[in-house]
Image: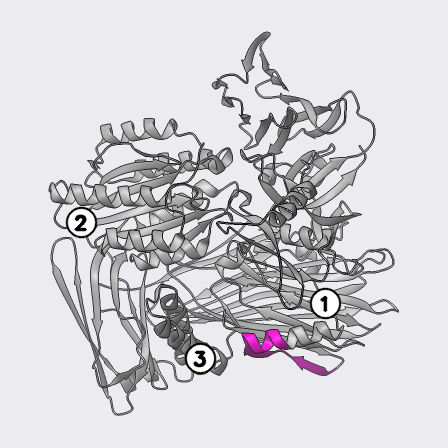
Amino acid sequence: MEGRAFVVLLVIASLIVLAENTDHKNAIEIYSLHVDSTVTSRFAHTVITSRLVNKVNESREAIFEVELPKTAFITNFSMSIDGETYPGTIKEKASAQEQYDIAVSHGQSAGLVKTTGRKLEQFHVSVNVASDSKVTFELIYEELLKRQLGKYELLFKVRPKQLVKHFQIDVHIFEPQGINFLETDSTFMTNELTEALTKVQNETKAHILFKPTIGQQKKSPELEETLLDGDFIIRYDVKRSVSAGDIQIVNGYFVHYFAPSEMPTFPKNVIFVVDQSGSMSGRKIEQTRDALLKILEDLRPEDHFSLITFNSLVTEWKNTLLQATGQNVESAKRYVKTVMARGGTDINNALLTAANTLDKASYAEILQAHSISMIILLTDGQPTVGVQDVEIIQQNIQKAIKGKYVLYCLGFGFDVSYKFLEKMALDNGGIARRIYEDSDSDLQLQGFYQEVATPILKDIEIQYPENSILELTQNSFKLFFDGSEIVVAGRIDNELDVLPVEIQAQSHTSNLIFKEEANVREKEKVFQHQKYIFGNFIERLWAYLTIQQLLEKSISAQEEQQKNLQVARALELSIKYSFVTPLTSMVVTKPDDQQKLHLANKPTESDNEKSRVTGFSGNKLTKSHITKALSYRRHHDQSMYYVHRAPKTGQRAILFDTPEHSPDIFRTVQTTAQLLTNEYPHFLFQLPRQNDVICLNIDGQPQAYINLISDPDKGVSVTGKLGRNRNHFVLFEITNLDPHVQLRVSKEGTVLSYGGHTTKLPWTKSASSTVQGLKIAVEKERSLTMSASANITIKITFIKSPNRFLGLYFMDTDHFSDKASGLLGQFYFDTHLESNPGASQGEDERVLSVHGQKHRVTRKNKKDYRQESATGIISCWSLHITP
């Protein structure tokens, strides 16, 4: 990085900006950053415009990274340099990939953009900016806001990292139904910044403007540091009544919103099917237990429920469903507290047991006649016991459920196949959701349950004149949950003057029919002469909704021909309306001295996972090939590495799959791959508010004790001692100030000191202790967990093979203060990863900035001491330092 500088712009759900320079303060200045968002009848059109200037007398690289909502489609991108504009173009994905491959084969510098996070996905492009030159980036994306738990939400993550002269977030909302409530929230707002926020609202319109001056952005008058670091949120809902909903019409296209409220809730019959296999050990199973305890408390007295846990075996809490009385809920909570993680994963038998339990309860007339039955599956891995072919499992479950019950599939982390869960859920009337491994995983689980906890309608059919409506989106729905919304769109025949609609549905108490008529000409007048709308927005809304539904239908399509037709139609609409979808890509050609091509794809949730069948080929199999292959391997227990020499070309390729019969030559690659990762790092930790994991090793001679972290604000400190061979840590001492408790954790066990008394907690048995809110728990021969009142959770794992040692990690890195110090403490604030333009070809390298100091880090595969499996592998950024 020496002698180079760059600026990084990040926009999350509209806006994050970072600016870093290695040798000149603000060499590239962001002098203007605008986010202009127009929301018209739930359809949001967002334009991000960033203007920069290179203030030094040499060229610098500007990197533009935009993180936008997963539900959004990019529609346009351009960059303007010294008055000349360079636009991106949207192409069919295969064609764009071919253009990208040709660029690479010709030796051109090319970048591939395919990253995704919990709620966001990333768009990335960079360009060299000459001295005294200006560059303008503009990105446009569109999305249909989804109503969840009674509100729509716009989230702007704001992190400029420098003061911006012209900074603003400008949001216009127009809702013809009327705005019922509107609120803004922020995690960084001060009294000074509050003065920069204005809200103007009437019956149908709202204008929110956040426009802080340089002075208002400053942390203090004497510091050139910005306060803008956190979330800026807008929430609102519209007015509605118990009717057939609201219809809006523009230029021959209509959208129909239906969201009744104040209706009785159906009683639920719900079976929670919870994975307790070995891979769920530690933090996952703890958070799952916490979430289930809260969810059980939220059951209504009229609900019926049961619990099934599974690993290599399937265990039923009860062999039937019980009513959610206080006594039964308490009994279930006691059972949940005993759930421990160990063994394999028999998903097939667990789900078949759940379906059979519902069948038996139905036959025995235990369940209410007008009730909703659902199965909620939570798993974190692939099936390893019993039936392991995912297609056969999907078929078995669909045959067992037979459309009688709804299946929801929650995938915990990234070792699970999201495609497998998504298809199984869609086949059975439900949805899939990924639960991200984080400090709030239990809240994610609770949040999902709240979305499906209050069904108020079922079997909803929405009918329009058959011969007068063309290209209608989905108009029949199995369930409707309170706080959500049904959206239907279509094209109206030119001769239609009145659009009638009839909705038939069943509530808990009766069959319902809603009727409504919309005068086409009167409805179109609503949007005339409105500056809040953007062109043919309902037509674009219809295309957006149609594409999403076609892609979803293609996942559960039974016939290949049907699937191909759905994909082809979705591709046709994606190109026609210039949407970057999973079927299209945006190609950006950059005006450098040598042409540089970037390819921006729309990642799917499955792209977060590493492929189970992936290959690297070449005439010579090298360590580099195997290292790259390892980076794709997430579920080590379920995949092996093989070499196959092509009969004609003689090329070797690394694949991972699991053939039933494999020649000995295959095993040599597996052995080589294991040797490359036969190393535990000294420490594993996740950077605060980031998804990146650092693998840290310590160089130098072992010391008596190493100060690992000391945080006076949180009242926690940890020291550690390396073993004689310096390979691993063999002793940790944890000190908590309030209450004053000391833990000395060694390979023999733990000694707890408090108030002049000591208690020994050996590894040979499970035990727990609570001291004034401080919780200490030992899981037999596995781990020790200390949960402090300051929201800090420290975990130490006991590794027995090949050599006994201890592994330390922190579960809540976001909660340390900026006063944390020590070998690990230095990484918990003012630390982030940067791109490394000088990286060696073929190497995955980044620069880790720690309080301004730069460290080169390389992507490596290490053994994960946080997992129970001795073969658990993690891909991380490897760093060596000397204490």
Q: Label 1: few (<14), some or many (≥20) within 10 Å?
A: some
Mark 1 falls on what kind of element? strand
Amino acid type of the residue that numbered disc 1 sits on in the rendered structure: Tyr
Residue sitting at the far top: 756
Q: Label 2: few (<14), some or many (≥20) within 10 Å?
A: some
Q: Quadrant of residue 695?
A: top right
Give the residue displayed 83% in from the left and 31% down from the top. Answer: 700
Q: Quadrant of residue 176?
A: bottom left
Residue sitting at the far bottom: 495
Residue pointed to by mark 1: 31
Residue pointed to by mark 3: 573
Foreground of the two, 612 or 735: 612
Q: Which residues are magenta?
A: 83-98
The C terminus lies in quadrant: top right
Query: CA–CA distance between discs 3 and 1?
Result: 38 Å
Mark 3 falls on what kind of element? helix
From the viewer's perspective, tell me whether residue 439 is left or right of residue 696.
left
Q: Quadrant of residue 570?
A: bottom left
The N terminus lies in quadrant: bottom right
Residue 366: percent from left, percent from top? 13, 40
Residue 635: percent from left, percent from top? 53, 46
Amino acid type of the residue that numbered disc 3 sits on in the rendered structure: Leu
Give the residue displayed 82% in from the left and 57% down from the top. Answer: 25
Q: Is residue 260 magenta?
A: no
Name which of mark 2 and mark 3 comes first in the sequence.
2
Query: CA–CA distance between discs 2 and 1?
Result: 59 Å
- The colour scheme of the drawn protein is one colour
Q: Is residue 88 magenta?
A: yes
Marking on residue 371: 2
